Image (tube, rainbow, N blue to C red):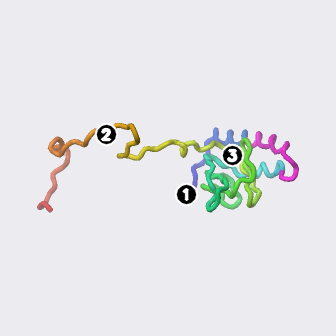
Amino acid sequence: MRPREMRPDELVEMALRRARLREVVENLQADWNPGADAVAAAPYLDRWETSRYPGTDRPCLKGTVYGHPVAGDAFLTTSVIRHQGNGFAITESSGRLYVLGRENRQHKRTRILSGRRGAFRPAQAAPPSPSEDTHDDLPELEGPPL
């Protein structure tokens, strides 16, 4: 699945986040400082959420990535996070730097399944009885009854 094209306002937001990230990485320790070139080449991870890396209890990120050197523009699960700061993350396996866009907060909503009710919730009204629904709006079927 290929993500949609980014809108102009989203491109501006991505550029602003890259600028803030450049300021942050200038102040990082030199042993893992990605540098200005790495910031310029960093993939942009939008609508991301924190998850658990498969088979471990260690955190990773999932989201829509733009400009990834291998995956291109796609939905992606990163490797384990080595460091995450305000607007960026560095992963463990490749040391790849990601510019973080908007966090996906949709997954944090509580969902109630249709037809279910929780504690202290009233039951839904009973469905109408068959005698109340005459189905006058349905077309007549042609041919013998089945």
**Quadrant of the drawing holding the C terminus:** bottom left
Marks 1, 2: nearer the viewer: 2
Q: Which residue is mark 1?
A: 1
Q: Are marks 1 and 3 in contact (CB under 8 Å)?
A: no
Residue 27 on the magenta segment = yes
Dot placed on the residue nearer the N-terminal end, 1 or 3: 1
Q: Residues within 10 Å of mark 1 (few under 14, many from 20)?
A: few
Marks 3, 2: nearer the viewer: 2
Dot placed on the residue nearer the N-terminal end, 1 or 2: 1
The amino acid pointed to by label 1 is: Met
Name the spot of residue 100 as percent of width and height, x first.
69, 46
Residue 6 on the magenta segment = no
The amino acid pointed to by label 2 is: Gln
**Residue situated in front as seen by the camera: 27 or 2:** 27
Separation of residues labelled 1 and 3 (CA atoms): 21 Å
**Residue 124 circle label:** 2
**Residue situated in front as seen by the camera: 6 or 51:** 51
Q: Which residues are magenta?
A: 18-32
Q: Are marks 1 and 2 in contact (CB under 8 Å)?
A: no
Q: From the viewer's perspective, is 76 left or right of 116?
A: right
Name the spot of residue 140 as percent of width and height, x first.
15, 51
Separation of residues labelled 3 and 2 (CA atoms): 43 Å
Q: Which residue is mark 3?
A: 100
Count of marks overlaid on the render: 3
Q: From the viewer's perspective, is 110 left or right of 18?
A: left
The amino acid pointed to by label 3 is: Leu
Q: Is residue 103 above or below residue 51?
A: above
Q: Is residue 107 visible?
A: yes
